[in-house]
Image: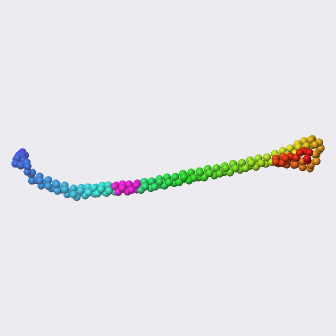
């Protein structure tokens, strides 16, 4: 145990505030070795990782900024297209209204023309029917007048030419209201 006694004796002589010089030398060498390893291998690797991170962050920010600008441009294009579509829709709507008004006017004009044509055709048909009725009535009235006159006068008016002349004269007297009919004996 003499070795143990020596260590204990040294410890008793040693001041706890002052470090042992051998420990300081070993600590300094270990510290220098640690610093050299850190500077040679760890710090460059850390700097490289730091630069990579900075580049990624800056690239991400630039990509985000570019994406934001592109989104703003797309938004402006969308707004412009929307405004153009609204303008075009308004133009189409106005054109449709104008077309509808034109079609309505054309339909009214065609309806008026058709109504006028139907009225004119009705008037023509009515005039033709009237003239037909007047001819038929003249012939019938003429025949009845001749029969009546033949009975009254007592002579036969069978001669067709005489009969037609008498009928025409009688009808002419009927149609002219301002002339006085001649007395029966004056003829």
Measured from the top left, where is residue 126 in percent x and y? 76, 47
| Residue found at x 86% / y 46% | 181
- How many marks do you count on the picture? 0
Measured from the top left, where is residue 127 in percent x and y? 77, 48
Q: Is residue 121 left or right of residue 136?
A: left
Q: Verify whether residue 69 appears in magenta.
A: yes
| Residue found at x 49% / y 52% | 86
User: Is residue 6 visible to the viewer in this orientation of the structure?
Assistant: no
Measured from the top left, where is residue 6 in percent x and y? 5, 48
Secondary structure, magenta segment, majority class = helix
| Residue found at x 11% / y 52% | 23
Residue furthest right as drawn:
155
Q: Is residue 50 left or right of residue 130?
A: left
* Rendered view: 82 above or below 150: below
| Residue 76 or residue 96, whichever sits in front | 96
| Residue found at x 32% / y 55% | 57
Q: Quadrant of the N terminus?
A: top left
Q: Is residue 119 left or right of residue 93?
A: right
Q: Verify whether residue 165 appears in magenta.
A: no
* Residue bounds of the magenta highlight: 60-72
| Residue 66 or residue 19, whichever sits in front | 66
User: Is residue 11 visible to the viewer in this orientation of the structure?
Assistant: yes
| Residue 35 or residue 182, whichever sits in front | 182
Measured from the top left, where is residue 128 in percent x and y? 79, 48
Image color mode:
rainbow
Q: Is residue 24 left or right of residue 110?
A: left
């Amino acid at each position: 145990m003499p070795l143990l006694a020596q260590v204990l004796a040294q410890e008793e002589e040693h001041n706890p505030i002052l470090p042992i010089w051998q420990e300081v030398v070993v600590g300094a060498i270990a510290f220098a070795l640690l610093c050299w390893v850190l500077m040679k291998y760890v710090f460059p690797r850390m700097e490289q990782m730091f630069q990579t991170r900075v580049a990624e962050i800056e690239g991400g920010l630039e990509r985000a900024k570019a994406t934001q600008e592109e989104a703003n441009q797309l938004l402006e294009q969308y707004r412009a297209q929307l405004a153009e579509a609204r303008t075009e829709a308004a133009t189409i709507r106005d054109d449709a209204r104008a077309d509808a008004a034109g079609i309505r006017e054309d339909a009214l004009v065609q309806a008026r023309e058709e109504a006028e044509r139907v009225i004119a055709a009705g008037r023509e048909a009515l005039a033709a029917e009237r003239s037909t009725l007047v001819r038929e009535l003249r012939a019938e009235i003429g025949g009845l007048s001749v029969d009546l006159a033949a009975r009254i006068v007592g002579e036969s008016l069978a001669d067709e030419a005489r009969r037609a002349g008498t009928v025409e004269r009688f009808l002419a007297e009927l149609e002219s209201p301002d002339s006085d009919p001649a007395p029966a004996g004056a003829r």
